[in-house]
Amino acid sequence: MRRLLLFRHAKAERSEPGMEDRARKLIERGRKEATRVGNYMSSHALIPDRVMTSPSARTQETWKFAAAAFRTPPTATPVERLYDATAHTILNVVRETTPATHTLLVVGHNPGLHEFAAMLIASGDIEARERLREKLPTSGLVIIDFAFDDWGKLHPHCGRLERFVTPKSLGAAAS
């Protein structure tokens, strides 16, 4: 079995004229939400063997704040092809993951990450699937399980949505 965690970057500053998109950093809300999702991951034993991020500042910061919740967080590897990637590009990047990786975390961007999640999911909790179909918000975490042992076998409609977590759903659960 393999598990894929798809984590959309947290809320970032708006683009300003002359600002490079890759340089956009998290705002305070984004730092708090990334930390909240990291705490959730840690407390629910959602510990990745490997972490890949887009090379953007906001994806790398998202993992930095989330990773603080882990006793020994895995180091994130920036992957150039994940920046502004399409669903098919992300699919190809994940397929190249070594078999030694059982749980993979990808921190990336919409619309590609959202489309990739929708492409993979064939089953799972109907309510969570409907919420995900509507949108993958900033700091949204999608957990998909696969009944194979080789990432190279990854293909559309082969995954089961194990859960879909957002800062809003975590806030509602805490209330």
Image (cartoon, grey):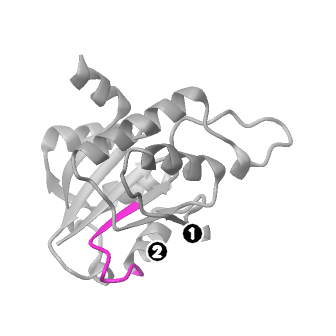
**Residue 79: which numbered mark, if any?**
1
Regarding residue 17, the answer to whether it shows in the image is yes
Q: Residue sitting at 34 percent across and 68 percent down? A: 49
Q: Residue 50 placed where, x, y %?
A: 39, 68
Towards the viewer: 152 or 1: 1
Q: Residue sitting at 20 percent across and 62 percent down? A: 145
Q: Check the image and report above or below for 125 versus 6.
A: above
Q: Amino acid at mark 1?
A: Val
Neighbor class of circle 2 (other Cα within 10 Å; few <14, some 14-19, many 20+) is: some
Tell me: 10 left or right of 13: left
Neighbor class of circle 1 (other Cα within 10 Å; few <14, some 14-19, many 20+) is: some
What main secondary structure does the magenta stretch of the protein show? loop
Query: Dot 1: what SS?
Result: loop
The magenta segment: 96-105
**Residue 93: which numbered mark, if any?**
2
Res 82 → quadrant: bottom right
Whether label 2 touches label 1, CB < 8 Å:
yes
Regarding residue 114, the answer to whether it shows in the image is no
Q: Residue 106 placed where, x, y %?
A: 43, 60
